[in-house]
Structure formats: structure tokens, C-alpha cells
Amino acid sequence: MIGIPEAFARSTVEREGKRGAAWLAELPGIVDELSGRWGCVLDGEVMHGGVGVIVPVRRPADGTAVLKVSFPHPGNVHEPDAFAAWGGRGAVLLHERDDVRFAMLLERAGTSTLAEVEDGDEVVSVAGRINRLLAIPAPPGLPRLREQADAWEEELRKDAEELAHVLSRYAVDAAVATVRELGRAQPDVLIHGDLHARNILRADREPWLAVDPKGYAGDPAYDGGTLLKSRALTLLEADDLRKAVHRILDVFAEAAEVDRGRVQRWAQFHAVRAAFWGRRHGFRIARSGSRLDWVIEFADRLAELLTERS
């Protein structure tokens, strides 16, 4: 039986309550059952992400692999579909899946992430190249990002009306315009949906491979905005924030071979949503107090900067 990491168990119960506690009680048995069914033996310490455990295993057919079991949640449903469609192109290989258990047997990558690379241009360039590899025709049955456009617009308008904020009307209107003009007419292209440097791992088969996709069909430029949002805190010490932000947009767009203007518009949309989200819910790195105020102020600044024409 595996041991469940204490931090993972605590965060799962805090987030999911009794349901989470019940799932945690079943989790060692689930791992044992799947290991036996798929011919695996444990091969290292149990790791975890935000919503699942990653168990290093070994089996004769594939050598080293990892068994990933996630808490049952709608956001995890299409992860194996994305891996199956990519077939190892830019992402780890899918060997086995059990959709009822929210479990997969995956190619084992390293534990080092792209976030550990100090060269910011390299981080963005690698993410852009991965984004380009993942952008293939989306199979039927995957959620289409365009289906979220109405909810995005309603959310933006509601937040702008209900929350005390200093965002300009121009910035909010620009985010709404992106939803209307780009959000409702997105291509049927498979994208990661949560592309950031911690979701790109060093590997043996390829230098870098993506993990933890959402499995959406949509605009590949959308994930350029996701990446920039995730890089925001690395920009805090930039001597020239505007120059640093536009450098990220330029490098990503070139590496991903996507339209630079679309990347900026999606990045601005993500920044405005983040500024409002922080006011309602806080951020993982700051839930309340002066630090939260400081992060929100920076999100506002980033949103306004991205609203400007390049």
C-alpha cells in the first residue's frame, strides 16, 4: 500500500471535505488494483500535484512509467483524451487509462520543470514550441472553449459592476471585446488549456514534454495568455515592465507560430480576469491582507499595460 503525502491529504480534505476524505481512504486500494491490472511494481516515492498523486512504477512492457490518479472532478475528464490525441507529440505518452477511476499510466518524465530554467527567453521559447506541437486538429467530444464565451462575458460585466476596482473602462471593454471577437469563433484545434512552465517537464525521449492538460479545443494563442499570466511574478523586478512583457509576447508568438496580436489580446483578457478573481477569492500566494493588495495592484497594472496598443 502506498503512503499518501500529508500535504496532499490535508489540501484535499480542505478543498473537498467529506468527499475528499472518503476518496483518500480508497486511494491506496485504487493504486494497488491498477498496479496489478497493468502489471506494474512501485518504483519510487509517491509525488503529488494539486488534485492527484503520481506514483513511479515499472513494468516489463514499457520500463519506467508513472501511475497518476486524480480526484474525480469535471476538469480532469478530458486529460487522457488529449494525451491519446497527441500520441506523444509534445506531451508524455499515454499507456493505459481508467476513466472511471480518473487514472492513467503515463510515460515517466523527469521531476525538473521548465520553471527552474533561469533564462526567461528560453522558458518562453520552449513553451511556445510545445504549444505549436500540441496544436493539432481536435477530436470530437472535447470541450470547446468557445462554449465558455457567454459565461466569460457575463462574469466580466458582473465583476466590473459589483467589485470595487481601479481598472479603466477601456481595459474592461477590451477584455469583453476579446471574448466577443476571438472567444466565440475559435478554431477546432487541440490546446493544452493550462500551459505554464511547471506543466512542462524535462524528459529523455524529448528535451521537454507537457503534462496536466485540460484538453480543450480552441485558439492556440489562448495559451500564450495563460503562460504570460503564470510568468507575471517573474516580472516584478523588471527594470522596464512594458519592455519585459512585450518581450514575452514576441518570443512566444514567434516560437509558437501564432499571431502576436492575438496573444496580446488573450493575455489582456487573462490579466483582467485575474485582477477581478483576486478581489473575489484571493490568490494561492496571497489570500488576504497587504500582500494580496499588492498582488492585485500588480495585476491591475499588467492588465492596463496589455490594453495598450503595441
Image (cartoon, helix red, strand yellow):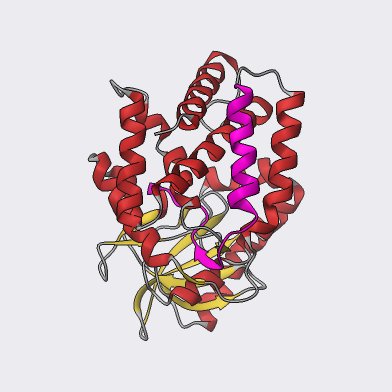
- The residue located at (59%, 47%) in the rendering is 9
Q: Is residue 247 left or right of residue 52?
A: left
Q: Position of residue 308 (x, y in %)?
A: 46, 29
Relative image position of residue 195 (x, y in whole percent): 45, 52
Q: Position of residue 119 (x, y in %)?
A: 22, 40
The image quadrant of residue 234 is top left
Q: Is residue 109 left or right of residue 220?
A: left
Does 16 sit left or right of 67 as displayed? right
Residue 47 pos. (x, y %): 44, 55
Residue range in magenta is: 168-197
Q: Nearer the viewer, residue 4 or 284?
A: 284
Residue that appears at 65% across and 25% down: 279
Q: Quadrant of residue 287?
A: top right
Relative vertical location of residue 247 with respect to residue 164 in this rendering, above or below? below
Q: Name the image quarter holding the C terminus.
A: top left
Q: Is residue 293 above or below residue 118?
A: above
**Residue at figure coordinates x 25%, y 62% from the top left:** 207
Could you tell me how many numbered marks the image carries?
0
Q: What residue occupies the far bottom of the structure in this picture?
A: 61
In the rendered image, residue 282 lying in the magenta stretch gets the answer no
Q: Can residue 73 be seen by looking at this rendering? A: no
Residue 71, picture quadrant: bottom right
Q: Residue furthest top?
A: 290
